[in-house]
Amino acid sequence: MLTRLEVNGFKTFEDMAIDLAPFTVIIGNNAAGKSNLFDVIQLMASLATRDVTEAVKEMRGEPMELFRRTTGGLAKQITLAAEVLVDPVVRDPWGSEVKLSHTRIRYEITLERREIKPGIERVLVAHESATPIFRKDDLWAERLRPSAAFRSHYLKYGRQKPWLTTEQKPEGLTFSVHQDGKAGRNRPASAAEASVLYSITNAEFPHLFALREEMRFWRLLQLDPALLRRPVSATASGVLNADGSNLAAVLAHLKAETATNIRPHGVLSDIVAELNNLIPGITKLDAELHEASREYRVELTMRDGLPFTSRVISDGTLRVLALVTLLHDPRHRGLICFEEPENGVHPARIKLLISRLREMVSHPETTDDEEFAPLSQLLLNSHSPVVLSALVDKELHPIDGSILFADIATVTDPEAKQQRRKTRLRPVRPKVQPSLCADFDNSHAYVSDYEVKRVLETVSTEN
């Protein structure tokens, strides 16, 4: 679970720091930087599982366009930091399972533009560290007020020393992986083309591996209706792709793995019930293997008994189906970033959609002794006032979770004699303090009630 994110030098971000709840929604107009926030999270996840060249290739824009550009020129470095809560047990691909002594970790990584030949630049890792967050410093846990069961199971504070540091040694700048059940090791940091985390592929260093696994499950869903609509090869993965292109295979796998004599469609029965609440008229969901083509196909049956394949189902229905499928998958874990959940949903049912999405994440404050499962988290962004209306109560406080407003602010730098524009993220004031927003100790750091009302008043113009 990602609990805090700090960004400097990436696209529109300058010295940005936000705390994140298990359910967080970013509200803002187009071009306010909402998608850039998702890009940061995607970049960090990619750096944990790919080398730098491959990680930056996946981003929107050219690699050098990731670095913040102002009137003063292009930033030299991108500095990223993430504070996370990892699951207390980690299992590597070979079945080794290790219980962790510490689950609150702060990870930092700095990317740097470096000229390797005249006129040729490359992006390299200039700094990397992973350090324990101590109980006394864990403001996120204090503010979220987790239950005793959640604290006992998930919050471990048994480590005092870092797992990974960047140090200046006689032989030069060095990444040092410190002892964690096994002897540590050092690596040169003079021209690092990949993160150290990328090299931790098993539980030999269990806490770093747990951190890598956590970041590997940070996923940006960019569902493509054209791909959701297609039949899927019988050999496709049973884990939903970011674009949703293997949805039919995922549904078929879920049906096979959860079916019983009483419930022959398994969890698909729950998915269709959820879907019917949001898009009425759907009575049955199935995913079968077409023997002749060896492809999986999605089929929905409507109230009148007529079946329809995914080829003729609307874009909005397919998007909602994919999201609900992912959140009902017993194997699901980690952070999902999802843009504009309201697309394809009737405005009258958006409140229900938001309520159901909120229920499907981990809830530290209400977890009991029977609810231990992999941690799940949802980060949404939207420009819709209808979505905002579903998130706040009559007094304009968040009903549950956290709401952040995104906009572009102008920063004046007298010393540099320049003005810079940057993305600003401010929380809607919570009803009860302390909260995740406790660092904001003055009214100017919160979204004012007037701003919230102004957005809500545009509901009639949006419909």
Image (spheres, helix red, strand yellow):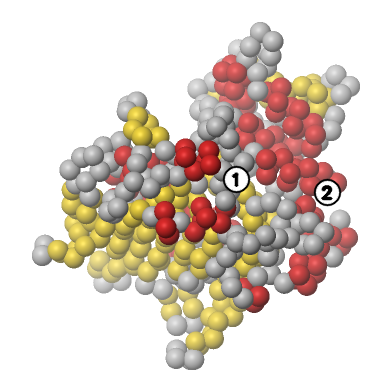
Front residue of 417/137: it is: 137
Label 2 or label 1, whichever lies nearer to me, is 1
Q: Mark 2 points at which residue?
A: 347
Seen in the picture, residue 301 relative to 380 is either above or below; the reply is above
Where residue 58 sits: x, y (%)? 46, 51
Residue at x-position 26% and y-position 57%: 165
* Label 1 Cα crowd, 10 Å radius (few <14 / some 14-19 / many 20+): some
- Numbered marks: total: 2
Front residue of 53/150: it is: 150
Q: Can residue 221 be seen in this view?
A: no
Say which element carries label 2: helix
Where residue 406 sits: x, y (%)? 64, 66
Residue at x-position 37% and y-position 31%: 91
How much space separates mark 2 and mark 1, taking CA atoms? 30 Å
Answer with left or right where residue 43 lies relative to residue 34.
Answer: left
Amino acid type for the residue under numbered disc 1: Glu
Residue at x-position 60% and y-position 60%: 435
Say which element carries label 1: loop
Residue at x-position 52% and y-position 55%: 142
Q: Name the residue under label 1.
A: 365
